């Protein structure tokens, strides 16, 4: 039986081929960053770290696909998702594709940052709630200092 747990946290490759494939971190603090070649860099995150990956892809016909994923690198022993661009263990908190949903996520991140909050420290359930609401065309829920402090209190109490 395979052990699906990974002590490594999560690793991913950021690719940048101007006007073709562009991956970048919106937030997150990689534990390591290694340049693979002139177009790729591999970053890794410690277990528990939260990060956002923006991916932009253009085809030969000019069609553009944009997506955003917010993920948490998972510690050993906790359930995690198998994601094709992640090596190691990660829990997907949010995934949105398309111009309007991605813009809504970007605006939410900006609102959180304007309050002086770090999006990496936001309650993971908030990102899941936002993801579900955007998928069902409902308004984004607010995330403010009171909700954040309640999350910090619950986390400290457990």
Image (cartoon, helix red, strand yellow):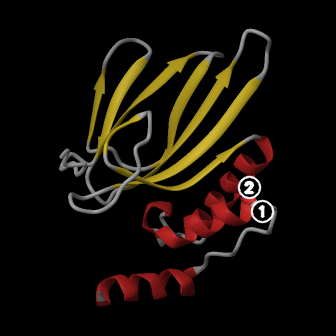
Q: Is residue 63 visible?
A: yes
Residue shown at 70% from the left, 47% from the top: 102
**Residue 106 drawn at (x, y percent):** 67, 52
In terms of sequence position, does the residue under pointer 2 or pointer 1 come before the other? Answer: 2
Going by the picture, which residue comes out furthest to the front?
Answer: 1
Which of labels 2 and 1 is toward the front?
1
Res 56 label: none
Give the residue pinned by disc 2.
Answer: 104
- Between 43 and 75, the one lying in front of the other is 75
Tell me the quarter of the image containing the C terminus. Answer: bottom left
Residue shown at 56%/71% (left/top)?
A: 126
Q: Residues within 10 Å of mark 2 (few under 14, many from 20)?
A: some
Locate residue 131 relative to residue 98 in the image: left or right: left
In depth, the one of 39 and 62 nearer the eye is 62
The residue drawn where x is 33% and y is 60% is: 79
Residue 35 placed where, x, y %?
31, 21
Q: Is residue 111 visible?
A: no
Location of residue 67 with respect to 79 vertically, above or below: above
Which residue is nearer to you in this view: 58 or 87? Answer: 87
Q: Which residue is mark 1?
A: 136
| Place of residue 60 in the rendered image (x, y in percent of width and height, measured from the top left) | 73, 9
Q: Is residue 146 above or below residue 124?
A: below
Q: Secondary structure at mark 1?
A: loop
């Amino acid at each position: 039986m395979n052990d699906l747990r990974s002590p490594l946290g999560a690793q991913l490759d950021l690719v940048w081929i101007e006007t073709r494939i562009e991956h970048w971190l919106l937030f997150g603090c990689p534990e390591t960053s290694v340049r693979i070649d002139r177009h790729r860099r591999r970053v890794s995150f410690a277990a528990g770290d939260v990060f956002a990956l923006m991916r932009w892809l253009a085809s030969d016909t000019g069609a553009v696909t944009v997506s955003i994923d917010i993920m948490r690198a998972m510690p050993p022993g906790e359930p995690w998702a198998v994601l094709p661009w992640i090596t190691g263990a990660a829990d997907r908190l949010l995934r949105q594709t398309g111009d309007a949903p991605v813009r809504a996520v970007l605006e939410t991140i900006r609102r959180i940052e304007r309050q002086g909050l770090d999006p990496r420290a936001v309650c993971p359930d908030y990102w899941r709630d936002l993801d579900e609401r955007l998928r069902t065309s409902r308004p984004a829920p607010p995330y403010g200092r009171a909700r954040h402090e309640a999350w910090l209190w619950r986390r400290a109490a457990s």
